[in-house]
Each structure stands twice: as structure tokens, then as C-alpha cells.
Image (tube, rainbow, N blue to C red):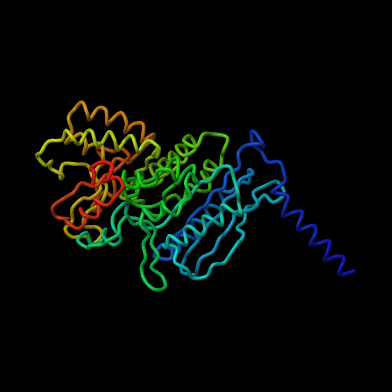
Amino acid sequence: MAEVRYILAVVLSAVLFSSCITEEYEGPDPDLPVRTILVWLGGDNNLSDETGRKIEALRQGWTYTGNKCLIYQDSRDGARLLRLRGGCRTTPTPYVEIVREYGAENSALPATFARVLREVADEYPADSYGLIFFSHASGWLPAGTLQNPQKQRKHSRSIGVDDGGTGRAEMEIAEFAAAIPDGMFDFIVFETCLTAGVEVAYELRGKSDYMLASAAEIVSPGFTPVYPSALRLLCNTAVETRTALEAFGHAWMNYVATNYTGARRSATLSLIDIDETSPLAARTQAALRTRSAEAPDLSRLQHFDRPGSYGDSPALPRFFDLDEWVEEVADPDEYEAFRAQLERTVVWKAATETFMAGQNGFTVRRHSGLTTYVEQDAFPDLNQAYRRLSWSGAVYGY
């Protein structure tokens, strides 16, 4: 009799477990494309505790609509693959399921990133894929040079940091892009600092249709407060991807404007149509061919980093507004053609009036949605690294 009760319990739990998968869900059309979202939490660093809070916020925001949300979490406790479950009629309370325990591993290795992407694509097939990427980042800059711009590196472009185990590791943007299968993502949402650079966007051609990113730093806790209400926007395949990303961006910017004061009321965000970065490179090249031989005064240009805040010396800006830079140096007619293409590339953007006021911050008087580096005599090694970028090759012919 005990054996019969056990079998019955197993059968009932199996039915309950599968009910969210087969049950009709509330939505405009049960035949909508299926989307799998991977949330990458690269937190085997000083962001470790923050990964746990993000998982809880994502859990609160989960509603099953036929889609899937996987979470790769790397923290001081090791790495694991999680899945959001529940959030349906039979199991209304969302919960987090452990899919796989990886143990200690380096989440900033391209091989790790590529392996997890393969696992997600193979085990959770979908019509559409999205990526939310959270970790430290420094735009296109070579690994370690946010803090030390004079540091010479053969490789460049840092995104994702793992400083657990054997030492600090940072993934290069080129490696990050190479790990992504061609055409895999409809969108990448970067919850990382200084990532809305034209150099980064250009590197992701053919990998994602859109990227949502910040030209400046993202002040902690980042998107965590809006995940409970706004995760559903990224899961909604009933609306166009661009519309969903704009809505998510609005949600965060509105939260910052409404709930924060002082230095914390600081945010920039822009939505980039990555396919448009190739014609943008061509228009930038044409505009810069007409530039004046006289070097512009870079101190007058809008920048989005906070020189001297990272232990960097010399403390000079390295993330300039792309639009203002081109306007400063190009022929007016060529600039207008460039500007028209820039508006096709940056399809939405928003920024607070100031950034980190009172904490070595700046006024945001110009925000085109994309930043760029401008070579400077003070950074000879950085200049050499910059010339190895795909963007530099397309625009400057290096």
C-alpha cells in the first residue's frame, strides 16, 4: 500500500510539474514565437552578492507565457545553470530550479561562455533568443587599462570579469562576439558599464539584431529594481523586439528618475540597431576624410567616463560622444549625412541631466547614444590597441 501511495505521488507531481508546459496561458495568441532568454550573471568578483538579489528580482518578475528563462550564475560559491519555473495557473508562485551545477569555473573565459550558449541552444530550442549580460566591463578598452591606461596589452576590449580562483580574468569583446553563433540573438541587454560604444556595437555585427547598453557606468543595483515588473517586456513576443526593448529602457530610466536623488540619480541608456553600424562606419569614414588638420580641443567634448575615479593616470577622458566628435572635425555637409545615419543606428536613447554629481561626475549636455575613443598623445599604447579594432579598420583603414 505504501508503494502504491508513492507511485501515485510521483505521478501527481509529474503532472503538476508538466502542467505549466502544456497549459494554455493568458496571452493574445498561444501560437506566438517561443523565446528563450539567457541571463548571464558574471559575479565571481565583488558583484557576487548582487547576483543573488538579481535572481530573486527575476523570479518575482517571471510569468510563464510559453517562453523560457535560463540564468547562468557565477558567484563566490561556484557556477550553476538555473531556470525560472512556475508563474502559471497550476503553480502561480514562480520558483528557481537548479538545472546544472558546474562548480568552480572561470566565467570570463570565452570557452565557458560558448559552452553555455551551446547548452542553452541545444536543450532549450526556440524561435527567438535574447541575452541579458551582467558583470563588470570597460567597453573596448584592453583588459586592465581602465585602471592603468599606460599598461600595454597585446589583446583588448574587456567584458566580464572573474577574479576568483587563480586570478583575475577578463574576456575580450572580440572573443565575446566570436563565442556567439552567427545570428543567434534578437537582442543583447548589457547590464554593464561603458558598453554603448560604437566599437562594441560594430564588433557584434551578425551576432544580434539589437543591443541595449549604457554609454556611462551603471550605478548599482542596476536593473534589479525593475526586473519584477519589466522582465515580462523582454519575454513578450507579441510585440516587435525594438518596441519591447524601448519599453524596458523606459521602465528603468523612469525608475531612476522617480526613486533616486543626488549622485544615484544617474543613468544613460541607448538602443542600437546593430545592422546599421556598417553603413555608420562608411558615413563616419567619409566624414572624417574631410576633417581639419587642426586637432580639436578634447576637453570641450562630452565624455561619459569619470577620469581619475578608477585609479587611472593620467586622468583623461576616453569615452567621447560620437556625434559631437564627428561634428567637431567634419565638413558640415558630410556631418549631416553622418548624422542621418547615426539616427538610423541609435533608435532610442535617454539620459539623466547629470551623472554622479558631486562624485567626480559630469553634466550630460549631449548624448547621441554611442561613444567613441579619440587617440591622444598621452596614451600611445592605448592608441596602438585601438588601431587593432574592427571599427578602426573600417573607419581609419588600419
Residue at 38 percent of width and 52 percent of height: 192
Residue 89 vertical position relative to residue 170 in the rendered view, above or below: above
Identify which residue, 177 or 362, lies in the foreground.
177
Which x, y percent locates residue 157?
32, 55
- Judged from this view, the residue extending furthest toward the top is 333
Q: Using residue 145 as the reference point, say whether residue 230 is left or right of it.
A: right
Q: Residue 288 occupies which quadrant of the picture?
A: top left
Side of 138 where 76 appears, left or right: right
Q: Quadrant of the N terminus?
A: bottom right
- Which residue, as the protein is rendered here, is positioned at the far bottom? 166
Residue at 36% over, 47% down: 203
- Residue 132 at x, y percent in the picture: 47, 50
Out of 244 and 175, give the one closest to the viewer.
Answer: 175
Give the answer, above or below, for where 66 lies relative to 47. Answer: above
Query: Residue lying farthest front?
Result: 397
Provide residue 140's location: percent of width, then percent of height: 31, 52
Q: Position of residue 386 (x, y in %)?
A: 24, 51
The one nearer the camera, 307 or 384, is 384
> Left of 383 or right of it: where is 216?
right
* Left or right for 356, reference 328: right
Q: Residue at x 41, y 57 (%)?
A: 135
